[in-house]
Amino acid sequence: MKKRLLVLAPHPDDESITGLLSLRLCQECAFEVWVLPATLGSRPERRVERQRELRAACAHLGFRLRLLPSLSTGMVSTQELAYELSARRPTALVLPHQRDGHPTHRATHRLGVAALDAAAHPQAVVETEYWHPLLRPNLMVAADRPQLEHLCAALACHRGEIARNDYAARLPAWMIDNVRRGAELLGGPGAPAPAFDFATLYRARLRTRRAWRAPFRGPRIIESSADLAQLVSCWN
């Protein structure tokens, strides 16, 4: 079966901001990455433009884009998303964590979980953070300089958002700080910082029978392609 990642993005641009794991799975593990936006933003007059920007960003990253019909109502429906999960059977689903500090991110988490429960089959889930940090991340994914530059270039495709707030210019600083936080959140208080400079933090879990369970013991730091392959083996 084709290895497939489904990214439930709260807005166009989140597929790039927190897209390091998706990018590495695509490049190093031959994953087919599908981006499914939960919304096109809160401003109706910008939605057509944001869709064009999202297409450009996905093309740059090598991701595929799926726009559900219910997106025209503002946010995709639980029923349509549940159908997508059942039809595509992704290896893992990426979505924001439940306490991320933006209402659309939190709503997207609730949408994703409701669709998972409606689809009623076990699913690996990777939760992202941006507006509010995860309290207990268990996954730190390292980025080298070319990967960082690739994400920044994709993020720059979202020109309207960049004009308002230059997320692309600030992404390196955020990913540097993730290394600082991740060193002790995953390694324990007083743990030495890893050798890499850029990273993104996630929480990997399994959703089954309307409950969460851990897919592996302890935290994981993903630096090499072998590390990434071992993570994927936990989802099979």
Image (cartoon, rainbow, N blue to C red):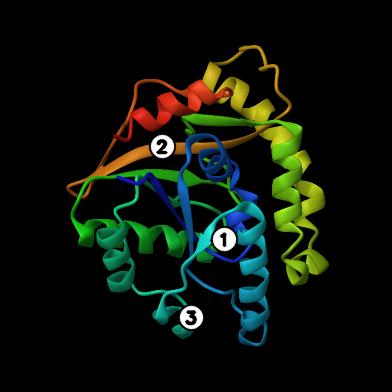
Disc 2, SS: strand
x and y percentages locating residue 160 in the rendered image: 76, 72
Q: Name the residue beneath numbered marker 2.
A: 204
Q: Residue at x 54, y 34 (%)?
A: 28
Nearer the observer, 131 or 200 = 200
| Of labels 3 and 1, the one closer to you | 3
Q: Tell me: residue 134, above or below residue 140.
A: below
At 47% from the left edge and 73% from the top edge, which residue is drawn? Answer: 67
Front residue (pair 137, 227): 227
Q: Which mark is residue 102?
A: 1
Mark whose residue sits in front, 1 or 2 = 2
- What x and y, as percent, mark residue 4? 39, 48
Give the side of residue 19 with respect to residue 173, left or right.
left
99 sits left or right of 160 in the view: left
Q: Residues within 10 Å of mark 2 (few under 14, many from 20)?
A: many
Few, some or many C-alpha atoms within 10 Å of disc 3 (few <14, some 14-19, many ≥20)? Answer: some
Residue beneath disc 3:
74
